[in-house]
Image (cartoon, grey):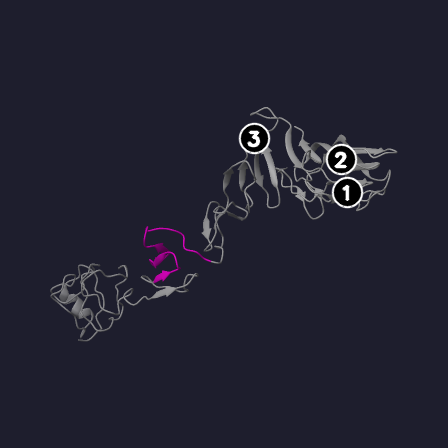
Amino acid sequence: MASNITRMPRGVPAQAQQQAAPGQQWWGGMPGWGGGGWWNGDCDDAIPPFPCPPPGWPPAGCPPWFSGANSPPWYPGANAGVSFGSTAPLNPVRGHFWWDGTTLWMFDGAAWVDTSTGGGTPPSTTAPANPQPGQQWFNGSTLFVWDGNAWVPVSQTKTSVQATAPPAPNPGDMWWDGTQFRIWDGSAWRMVGPGATVGPVPTVTHVFQITNPTASIVPTTAPLGIWAPTSTPTIDSLAAWNSTTHQYLPKTAGVYFFTTRTPTTGTYSSHTLLKNDGGSWVLNSNIYITVASVASATAQNQWLGSSGMVVMNGSTDFVRLWAADSTGSLYAAGVLPFIDAYLLP
């Protein structure tokens, strides 16, 4: 049967249509086709049994899908295809399926639809153009939302309630240790509260403590050398200790109160906590926070203690302990801490 059938206007008599298109063939006896052999304009599931699509099919205004039992193989959607991969296929047609390894999507002619839920946001490695505030974008691993200026990740942040700092935090992660609330800025835990506003009364916070259960080598006389502890901090709530440089560098600005202690069993011992030392101890040239020293004719078995306050800028300021002892080592056996730090309200 020929395939040159075209759509005729709804409501026009069969005779007039035949005169308007002389010699045109038509098919009768199927729902949706008038008894006089003309198309009545209805978009239903009655499709002529042609082996190939007739010109102009489907008629203008009719949706390009077909749910009838005799859907021909040439009809849009029947051979739309299936794609596999982490990136949506280009130039999809209505009815195209795509498996991204997690979700099966179907293209409805305008967008990819999650076949399991009827909605969703398909992953794309390229951010949408001209986004609107609140618009979401999933790149296959991270969900982002457009805040009006930038794409902000929303699927990686989390809140932890525990005594110790959460491992491997992401920017925006929040942590409550039972006393203080903090947020991770990408490099350090920034303290959020309690503060001097509505809420709990601010108190002094013990933010750092370190002992020295095994011996650390120090110079036997001045000049003093950097004290390199062999232990890790017992308290480091601001994650400010650098075990390589032996610096305490808090990323929270404020006033800090430090106490320092060192033991001695020899005839000479001295220690000092310096701020922003230039890599060497120079008498009267460094910024001293704490100082303790003793010298005697006979060996002494005692502890030297000192304390002091200092303002830290929360970015580059650091402190470091320098020491010397006539025995050549400092060894506390873990009895008392060498350094304590308190962040004042």
Q: Residue at x 18, y 70 (%)?
A: 49
Q: Residue 325 in the image: state x and y as whole percent.
A: 81, 40
Q: From the viewer's perspective, is residue 17 above or below residue 146?
A: below
Q: Which mark is residue 179?
A: 3
Q: Predominant secondary structure in magenta?
A: loop
Residue nearest the viewer, comparing 136 with 87: 87
- Please say if the residues under marks 1 and 3 sit with CB atoms less than 8 Å apart: no
Looking at the rendered structure, the secondary structure element under dot 3 is loop
- Comparing labels 3 and 2, the label whose residue is closer to the camera: 2
Q: Residues within 10 Å of mark 1 (few under 14, many from 20)?
A: many
Other residues around mark 3 within 10 Å, as few (<14) / some (14–19) / many (≥20): few
Q: Is residue 84 left or right of residue 210?
A: left
Q: Which residue is mark 1?
A: 329
Query: Where does residue 243 sit, x and y in percent of width and height?
Result: 68, 46
Rendered view: 212 above or below 139: above
- Which of the numbered marks, if any, corresponds to residue 134? none
Reading the chain from its start, which is encountered first: label 3 or label 2? Answer: 3
User: Where residue 78 appears, x then y in whole percent?
Assistant: 27, 66
Would residue 16 be found to the left or right of residue 294 on screen? left
Q: Is residue 110 magenta?
A: yes
Q: Amino acid at mark 1?
A: Ser
Q: Residue 217's quadrant in the figure? A: top right
Report the amino acid beneath label 2. Pro
Q: Few, some or many C-alpha atoms within 10 Å of disc 2 (few <14, some 14-19, many ≥20)? A: many
Q: Is residue 31 left or right of residue 182?
A: left
Read off the magenta span. Answer: 97-124
